[in-house]
Every structure is written in structure tokens, then in C-alpha cells.
Image (cartoon, helix red, strand yellow):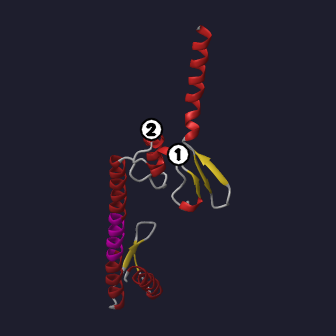
Amino acid sequence: MRSGFVAICGALLIASLCTPALAQWKWRDKNNQVQYSDLPPPQGVPEASILQRPAAANRRVLPAVAASSAQTAASAASGLAPVKGVEPELEAKLRKEEQEKAAKAKAEADKLATQKADNCNRARLQLRGLDEGLRVARVNEKGEREFLDDKGRAEEAARNRETINADCK
């Protein structure tokens, strides 16, 4: 009697260890090699290349994926696309992060455009002053004030024209 109970428990234990093997994905990658995983194939794999799906793949929430939401978040942070329909909260969080990144990039682009416009205006004003013959002075390394001669004025005008060509568009 006792040996029968141990045999049944052993058989149940072995059967429970085999169930993860049923939740396997099988697909061909771009090099035509067969890949096996307990996670779905990457987003770029066409439907025709998926050879086997787990039985739970047709459900809305996959148990293996739901249990590894931290892994899904890590893959999303690394630039991989998240599994759609798994966790609406996670998808909303990822969308919010993408919007924040886009807003930061736009703010940086606006800041750069403002700096370029300011550089453009300054260069135009300095060039106008040089062209009108105004005296331009600089402070040298010794802290002394010195006025630009014709060669210095020409070099300064050339620098201002380069800035105008680069920043004024």
C-alpha cells in the first residue's frame, strides 16, 4: 500500500515537471535555424515561420509572460517591443515613458533652435558693425585693450559670415 502511494506521488511529480515543456514556442529565425523558447518569438518573426505555439498562446494573458512582467519591462527598456495585450498598465506606463522621451527631445530641439537664432542675430549685428567701420576692441591675454586692424577685422568678418551660414537658415 505504501509503495503504491509513493509510486503515485512520484508519477505526479514527474508529470508536473513535464508541463513546462508543453509551453514551448518553436520558430525559424532569419538564418533558417529552428529556435525553441518559453517566450514568444521576437516581433520581426513572420507568422509563417512560427512552427509551434503553446496551448495557452491563444488566451489573452500568457501565464509565462504575465509571471515575468519584470522581464517584459526590461525588454521594453532595452528597445524591444512589448508583448501586446499582456498588461494594460505596463503598456500605459511604456507609452507615457515614450511620450516623455519625445517631449524631452522636442524641448532639446527647441532649445538648440533658440540658441542658433541667437547666434545668428549676434553674428549679423557684429558683421553689420564691422561693415560700417565701427572700431572694435578686444582684451588680450595681458588684460590690455587692443583695437582690431584691417586684417583682424577681415578675420572677424569671415568668422561672422561662417556663423551666419551655419545658424541662419
Establish if 20 lies above or below 159: above
The residue pinned by badge 1 equals 54
Q: Is residue 77 visible?
A: no
Q: Kindly identify the residue that appears in the image at 60 percent across and 13 percent down.
A: 4
Establish if 61 lies above or below 129: above
**Residue 109 location in percent, x, y?**
36, 68
Which label belongs to residue 114?
none
Which of the 4 quarters of the picture holds residue 149? bottom left
**Mark 2 vs mark 1: which is more N-terminal?**
1
Q: Secondary structure at mark 1?
A: loop
The amino acid marked with disc number 2 is Ala
**Residue 10 location in percent, x, y?**
60, 20
Q: Kindly identify the residue that appears in the image at 36 percent across and 54 percent down.
A: 97
Q: Nearer the viewer, residue 126 or 114?
A: 114
**Residue 165 location in percent, x, y?**
42, 84
Q: Is residue 132 visible?
A: yes
The amino acid marked with disc number 1 is Pro
Q: CA distance from mark 2 to mark 1?
A: 16 Å
Q: Which residues are magenta?
A: 106-118
Q: Secondary structure at mark 2?
A: helix
| Circle 1 residues within 10 Å: few <14, some 14–19, many ≥20 | some
Q: Nearer the viewer, residue 103 or 63?
A: 63
Q: Kindly identify the residue that appears in the image at 45 percent across and 49 percent down.
A: 58
Q: Which image quarter is the C terminus in?
A: bottom left
Main secondary structure along the magenta-highlighted residues: helix
The residue pinned by badge 2 equals 67
Which of the 4 quarters of the picture holds residue 119? bottom left
Residue 81 lies in magenta, yes or no?
Answer: no
In the image, farthest residue toward the top: 2
- Looking at the rendered image, the disc whose residue lies closer to the viewer, 2 or 1, is 1
